[in-house]
Amino acid sequence: MRVSIGIDLGSSRVKLLALDDSGESLGVTMASYSTESRRAGFAEQNPDRWWDALRLAMSELLARPALRGATIEALGMTGQMHGAVFLDAEGSPVRPAIMWSDGRAEAETAEIEQRISREELVALTGNRSNVSFTAPKIMWVARHEPEVMAKTSWIVQPKDALRARLTGEIGGDVSDASATLLFDLHARTWSNEICRRLEINRALLAPLRESEALAGGLREDAARALGLPAGIAVAVGGADAPTAALGLGLASEAGSNGTVLISLGTGGQVLAPVASPRIDPEGRLHGLCHVVPGQWCVMAAILSAAASLDWVVRLLKPGDPNGARELLAAAAKVPAGSDGLLFLPYLRGERTPHFDPSASGALIGMRINHGPAEMTRAVLEGVAFALGQGTDLMRGLGLDPKTGVVAGGGVNKLWQQIIADVLNMPVTLGATEHASGRGAALLGAVAAGIAPSTTKSTWPLPGDTRVMEPIPANARLYVERSAVYRELYERLPHS
């Protein structure tokens, strides 16, 4: 039995998923690490803690009975996007990694569109300037920590820093690079022109390859630390959202047949594979490279999906381990529309469609008869309305989302139904809740020759999925409620 292990370096934990050579899962393990905030708006992680978590999760995975006697031949990588890890010439971090959720570089974010017009920036990169992206983070460090830049030989994404420790090679992939604001989306390579105009040293950006390519072999010291055979294949890997799409079978525009990925993690995304770049001229959607060669993605991103549900649970059921279950059960008894209550999920600002880090969340329409059940359902509906704005923008680019596949840690039956009703399309529960890890394992299998390619893999998806059809009466009501929801951002203070 030939095995590939997917490594998913998430925002709060690393998750490992092992697949055999027929695509069957042999087990999942995970280990957590913390995000530090030295000052308001900062979000940093220690890359050494990523390694510690990887070692712990790997030891637990290899102890699983299903892996006894298996031949582990490959590792595939995926991870959180938009980060910045500053490495010295030896590949060691020279400061804590700056994460996607870090908001320190607001001044630099505005400065980018002063140096390069939004129209030109979006046309070239597929994206507008945003505080979450890598480019403003690099500009901030250059301005405020020149001693760090003096020691820096490479700037990479989080999963690439971890992979460098596995292989000793420095590199990156096109999907993660396309989410930095330093990338020519059409040419699938770094943009020398943008680097010049932002005064970012192009030589600090790691060489790029496609995600399924072989990055190198697992070096001996890393193999000993992880309990794996030295020299096994390590794939270049890819960004978490496109890798999740691959893990759920959305490898190409033609193959997806109008199906979009709906991800409910801390943030939320709607992602559609496309055969060529599709760019929203206003930059309200992200243009990205897919982890599949010759394919791209269009993605709507909101900042607080499961984070919104976590917030209302902490607010209404503090310290109660059963709080989420109880609130969801109560919310399921509330009719669609939450008795007039509306929620804006802008708890950490918002990306699609507003790109406003100062946007604030709100509960609108509170009355004395409203309680925890109505508030909880309103939160679920508000996130669904936000995701619905993304699918509508995709239609404006000529795409035709017909069905959705939902995945992520925030998925529950009630939310899946609400999303189906708001988007007015069938929504299928993802065949695996660890879609990014499965996609990463597939990338590793391709790099090792276990699978032929990301587009030609015959590995079947697990079959125990749940489909929610839209309820017509709810869908009609949500059309009306969504129209009111979309007016609220302009009517409420958001700066």
Image (spheres, rainbow, N blue to C red):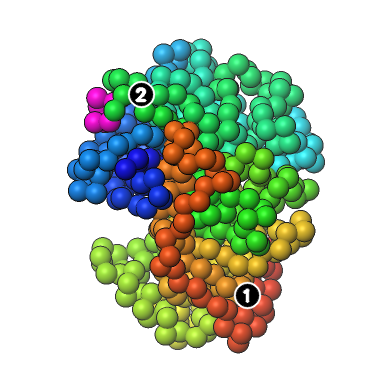
Answer with mark 1 or mark 2, whichever residue precedes in sequence. Answer: 2
Q: Provide residue 417's location: percent of width, then percent of height.
A: 50, 75
Question: In the drawing, does residue 44 fall left or right of residue 304?
Answer: left
**Residue at image point 42% right, 81% down:** 332
Q: Is residue 225 magenta?
A: yes
Position of the N terminus by quadrant: top left
Local crowd at mark 2 within 10 Å, few (<14), some, or many (≥20)? some
Q: Relative to 426, does residue 222 appear above or below in the rendering?
A: above
Q: Secondary structure at mark 1?
A: loop
Q: Main secondary structure of the magenta part?
A: helix
Q: Amino acid at mark 1?
A: Asn
C-alpha gap between disc 1 and disc 2:
49 Å
Q: Provide residue 230's location: percent of width, then percent of height.
A: 31, 24
Q: Is residue 62 magenta?
A: no
**Residue at image point 30% right, 50% down:** 26
Of 39 and 226, the residue lying toward us? 226
Q: Relative to 342, does residue 22 appear above or below in the rendering?
A: above
Of 4 and 135, the residue lying toward us? 4
Q: Residue 227 sits in which quadrant?
A: top left
Q: Which mark is residue 424?
A: 1
| Magenta range | 222-228
Question: Can residue 488 be seen here?
Answer: no
Q: Which residue is mark 2?
A: 231
Q: Provide residue 329's location: percent of width, then percent of height.
A: 36, 78
Q: Provide residue 187's location: percent of width, then percent of height.
A: 72, 32
